[in-house]
Image (cartoon, helix red, strand yellow):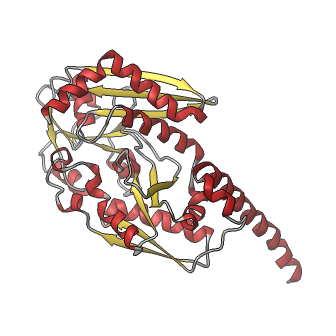
Amino acid sequence: MGNAGSAYAGPARAVHARISSIQQRVIKRRFPIMAQDHPAAVASPRRIVIASRESALAMWQAQHIQARLKELYPGTEVAINGMTTEGDRRLGVSLATIGGKGLFIKELEEALARGTADLAVHSLKDVPMNLPEGYVLAAITERADPRDAFVSVRYKQLSELPAGARVGTSSLRRESQLRARYPHLVVEPLRGNVPSRVRKLEEGQYEAIILAAAGLKRLGLAERITSLLTPEESLPAVGQGALGIECRSNRNDIAALLAPLNDTSTAHCVTAERALSRALTGSCTVPLAGYADIADGRLRLRGYVGAPDGTQVVRGEVSGPPGQAESLGRQLAADMKQRGAAAILAALDGIR
């Protein structure tokens, strides 16, 4: 038994040493002040509470992070506090008309402020570009499939849809790109949770619907995907496919615990995308897309701004070192504004 114990002790120490090393690197990068005071080893708390929306997809995301934290800190109880947000209560109304993405996270942030929750798990594409003062994204997880999915009962490809076919989407971003590429289609609003959207398709309300591939796969509905749209066909939303974990900016203890969950490559990509969106004053009331990937040590960022009807479109692209993600996002925004995005955005601002 003594030998068996020794055999396991080495790997266990190595795992904890790696976690501590990761924590220190992320802390130094994201919380430089905190790095000076935080000890090399992070003590596991007795209990962590995750705030989450109660939708099936949001609970999957919270449970995924719950499982990851339990693996890292087996002595810690990790609980989930499910709640209904204002956005959930008004699923039948377009976000663009009732206040935007913040409606899905306000109640979760209030739980963080009250201390009834320690962290909140979000689909990153639903997180506003500017967090309220006192809050921070402490970790961004490895990105799942960022693409949009074409879902149809009768047709195999988006390009097969005939003139007048009804396509359902909840996104101005998708609507603008659909109208620009396929002006013969009828794009109609689609609200509700993922299962209810699929049910509306089956009932014949639409010939096809467009949803995020990651959400379908996470809910075990991958078989409902008829085909996947390339970024060239439908450029993804900023942050699509990634999870963001939010906490109070003064919770250095929670930030340190979350550090091993942060995926550096995804964080670089999302940083560039969110910088692009911020510089373009993007929100869910603007048809805007941004998607970055990293290949051969280079970050490639693509952007899109268009009129809702797709008659005016500006696309752009920039590449550079991943460590310059923030500046690359601002650079692409400036270029796109100069080439017409500023005029599109000004016109949209005048309408709102």
Q: Is residue 140 left or right of residue 115?
A: right
- Image quadrant occupied by the N terminus: bottom right
Q: Residue at x 18, y 62 (%)?
A: 89
Q: Is residue 82 left or right of residue 166?
A: right
Q: Residue at x 29, y 34 (%)?
A: 156
Residue 333 vs residue 305, the one in the foreground: 333
Residue 74 vs residue 45, the one in the foreground: 45
- Image quadrant occupied by the C terminus: top left
Q: Residue at x 30, y 60 (%)?
A: 106
Residue 29: horizontal and vertical position, in percent?
62, 48
Residue 134: horizontal and vertical position, in percent?
43, 58
Q: Is residue 239 above or below residue 176?
A: below
Q: Is residue 175 above or below residue 81?
A: above
Residue 351: horizontal and vertical position, in percent?
13, 32
Disc tally is 0
Q: Is residue 229 visible?
A: no
Residue 270 vs residue 64, the one in the foreground: 270
Q: Is residue 237 visible?
A: yes
Q: Is residue 44 above or below residue 175?
A: below
Q: Residue at x 22, y 43 (%)?
A: 153
Q: Residue furthest right?
A: 3
Residue 147: horizontal and vertical position, in percent?
39, 39
